[in-house]
Amino acid sequence: MFKFFDLSDDDVFKPETFRLDARAFWEKRRTASKPYVFDLRSPEDYEAGHLPGAQNLPVEQFENSIYQMPFSGDILIYGSENGEALTAGEILYDNGFDTFWFTEGFETLYRPEGSWLVVTDEALKVLRDRLTEEEAKAVRIEVESGSPLKGSYAVAYVPDGESVDDLIGFEVQGTPFVAVREAVPFLEGTEIFINGEDELEIQNPNLSAKELSGSIEEQVQTLLDDQINPMVAGHGGMVSLRGIEEGKVYLEFGGGCQGCGMIDVTLKQGVEVMLKDHIPDLVGVFDVTDHAEGENPYYQPSSK
């Protein structure tokens, strides 16, 4: 949140108040109601790999781009190990922001920790038994991510003869687990337990994708909330449902999406594909935003 207050000589930036270790950073990203993640590294490093949904804002441009920071929500920033995050944190503080956190070192976020997972004793026994039964050497956590902050989770087992050299490995109470690097942003807070039907279940209370249910309007809104808006939020955008008629979905693009020259690509290759994949009954998806701020910017539902 942005607060208006005078900064005096006595009001000194205290980095320890805002610095998070890797696990705490993941937890904050998972539990924040509106996380905004900024990657302070160079565009080249960003393209080589970055957190899902993170927006690239090199530290050299940070101070001049302070206007891009959201006035509400939680700002999360990370850089390499050259002090970029500390510098950006001080800039945020000096400009009146107080709900931001930073971690120093992109690669430190991927250092494996068994504490990422919460596995009940009963579930752990089942996993160990299955490793023995299947002659496997590790439990593999699989995450199929539909958006930067939502994924579908599954458990698999790595056969003894299969290499795990390219995987992230860690242990939970002596039991080996592995995951691909791309799954790491979705692991912290993941729970493995035996459900009410005596079956092994894996989920993340904040990051698991919801099952679609209800009317078509409700299903579209769920996809907007859980998958589409987290993707465009990294660029300061948002998508709102304006109406559905005869299988046609009418959307309004706001924030950084309004007036964007790439909006047709975002709509046709991103939003429409995702909505139709999940809801096959949809006929089409249409942008009804007035990107030039005209007098009649939005779709008006018919009166019938």
Image: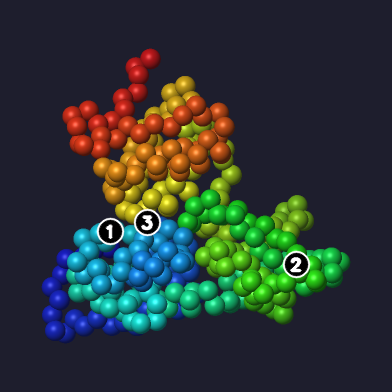
Disc number for residue 158: 2
Q: CA distance from mark 3 to mark 2?
A: 35 Å
Query: What is the three-letter code of the residue carrying label 1?
Result: Pro
Q: In the displayed structure, does residue 154 sit left or right of residue 205? A: right
Q: Which of the marked residues, 1 or 2, is nearer the chain's N terminus?
A: 1
Q: Residue at x 71, y 75 (%)?
A: 176
Residue nearest the viewer, comparing 98 with 177 = 177
User: Which residue in the rendered view is the most extreme toward the right?
Assistant: 133
Q: Quadrant of the N terminus?
A: bottom left
Q: In the displayed structure, does residue 238 sit left or right of residue 28? A: left
Residue placed under numbered mark 1 in the picture? 70
Q: CA distance from mark 3 to mark 1?
A: 11 Å
Q: Nearer the viewer, mark 3 or mark 1?
A: 3
Residue nearest the viewer, comparing 255 with 11 = 255
Element at label 2: strand
User: Which residue in the rendered view is the most extreme toward the front?
Assistant: 44
The percent position of residue 279, horizontal first and vertical second, equals 55, 35
Query: What is the three-letter code of the residue carrying label 3?
Result: Gly
Q: Nearer the viewer, mark 1 or mark 2?
A: 2
Q: CA distance from mark 1 to mark 2?
A: 43 Å
Q: Which of the marked residues, 3 or 1, is nearer the chain's N terminus?
A: 1
Residue placed under numbered mark 3 in the picture? 234
Q: Residue at x 57, y 68 (%)?
A: 181
Element at label 3: loop
Can residue 172 be seen from the camera position used here? no
